[in-house]
Amino acid sequence: MANYLLGMDYGTGGAKGCVIDDEGNVLGYGFEEYPILNPKPGWSEHDPALYWAIACRITKGCVAQAGIDPKAIRGIAVSSALPSLVMVDKAGNPINNAYNLMDRRATAEVDWLKAHIGEDRIFKISGNRLEDHPCIVKLMWERNNRPESYKKIHKALTIEGYITQKLTGAFTLLHGSAALYGVAYNLVERRFDGKLLDEIGLRADILPELYDCETLIGEVTPEAAAATGLAPGIPVCAGQVDFNASCVASGVIHEGDIQSNLGTCGNFGIIHKDANFMFEMIALGFTVDPTNTFITIPTTTTGGQSIRYLRDTFGQAEMQAAESLPDTDAYDLLNQQAEKVAPGSEGLIVLPFLMGERTPIWDVDARGCIFGLSLNHTKGHVVRATMEGVAYAMYDSFRMIKDTGRKINFPIVMHEGGAKSSLWRQIITDVFDTPTVLTKRRTGAPFGDAILAGVATGVFPDFSVSKAWAEYVEQMEPNAENHERYMAYFQVYKDLYEHVKGDYKALAGLRE
């Protein structure tokens, strides 16, 4: 009897799931977008009720596509984008909307932590700099601004933690995800610092018990089985961070391996064994050998989301046209317009900071900017300049890491989201001045989750199948002339930010 495995991944803009067999064949796949809610400036939320409703639909769809008996599924794993925060009561019901990784509201809490705890102390403990995005900072905001609902919080979960709780009834937290709770999570010692939590005045009991990715934390309950179409008793492991899941899916599992995604964020990750964390970057434990292995993930906040914004706001014609074209979506039509534009977008530069920026500038007040707009510029110019702006934002971090001499195994593996765009991949190849390849299998993070479920349940002895199944296509080499041109534009991009960053802060005051 064949062994089947189910993986699910929750991003900032939607959820994906897949069913695979023990030879790595994808038998069923599903994807569904959900809305990003922005009720106030700087706020970014989801309706948490959609998480479980979508899980039920995707699971039923994947199993139906696969044509299998749900009883043959040997294990389940879930991943999600971080930081995310789903606050639940004792019954597991969500309290308020869920936070997603673009939320930037907790600036006053950051100021308090800087004044009373200190950035250096927090970095020494957490391996990550103090900013407004970690879950602990969001929980401080809840305590300070919604004290009545804060009192109702039983556990503060991530999205993957919420889904595994709905599946099993267990309230859990990954060590990898805990790094994005930040502040009081000791990345090297893999524990929350109780003394620091006391100083912050945060209830330690709302933080779930910590687990490694491969740990089996429960089984599908009869109630969850009835809702999802699964069979009761299927083992569920603790899960993993979505970027790690994407790495496992593409065979990026060894020290020095590097992968880039263009999902809601634009990011790349480099796996390393050393604990020399960079103040400007984001670090967490990796899925494979998590007690000894880390991954540094530089991130621009609105990478693929920048293009989604252009599609949703200015791409109505493309969305309408795509409905009548087979195997074509609005993104393809926007790409076709951008392909007609020369590198540098004829003097157009975009700062793609639609919801503030993370690495390496860490500016909560930064916002998008189109610079150099002229009457000769078309929609294609704006699309290409946005792609280039995201590439500049990522390169800003890449050059800093490369200068450290840290081991990097080229080529860069391009995987999810906007990486399907050959134009965008070539832009990144030229800006970074490094070769890139594309993962042939486009299933993404849920495939990595299914592999994790297989390792957790003993279907696979280890993660070596990840490397064995990885296939790369469409290798690209950098164009030296384009790189030289892009470096000139990159310098203007950097200068432009320096010129306007004070104005960003002034503008933020007017938004309040």
Image (spheres, helix red, strand yellow):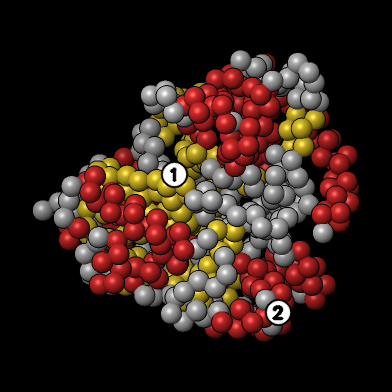
Mark on residue 444?
A: none
Query: Do we see residue 436 in this rendering?
Result: no
Q: What residue lies at 47% left-to-right and 40% top-to-bottom? A: 416
**Which one is in front, 354 or 208?**
354
On the picture, is 251 further left or further right than 24? right
Q: Position of residue 162 (x, y in %)?
A: 45, 67
On the picture, is 28 further left or further right than 194? left
On the picture, is 199 further left or further right than 49? right
Compute the Cα span from label 2 to label 1: 37 Å
Query: Do we see residue 345 in this rendering?
Result: yes
Q: Is residue 164 above or below residue 341?
A: below
Mark on residue 252?
A: 1
Counting residues from the start of the chain, the first of labels 2 and 1 encountered is 2
**Which one is in front, 193 or 59?**
59
Name the quadrant of the C terminus: bottom right
In which quadrant of the rendered view does residue 307 lie? top right
Q: How many marks?
A: 2
Tell me if mark 1 has few (under 14), some (14-19) or many (20+) residues whose alpha carbon lies within 10 angstroms of its own.
many
Q: Position of residue 161 (x, y in %)?
A: 45, 67
Q: What residue lies at 24% left-to-right and 61% top-to-bottom? A: 230
Mark on residue 200?
A: 2
Q: Position of residue 397 (x, y in %)?
A: 68, 43
Q: What residue lies at 59% left-to-right and 38% top-to-bottom? A: 312
Residue type, mark 1 in image: Val
On the picture, is 219 further left or further right than 376? left
Q: What residue lies at 47% left-to-right and 26% top-to-bottom? A: 322
Q: Secondary structure at mark 2?
A: helix
Viewer-nearest of labels 2 and 1?
Answer: 2
Residue type, mark 2 in image: Ile
Q: Position of residue 490 (x, y in %)?
A: 75, 30
Q: Secondary structure at mark 1?
A: loop
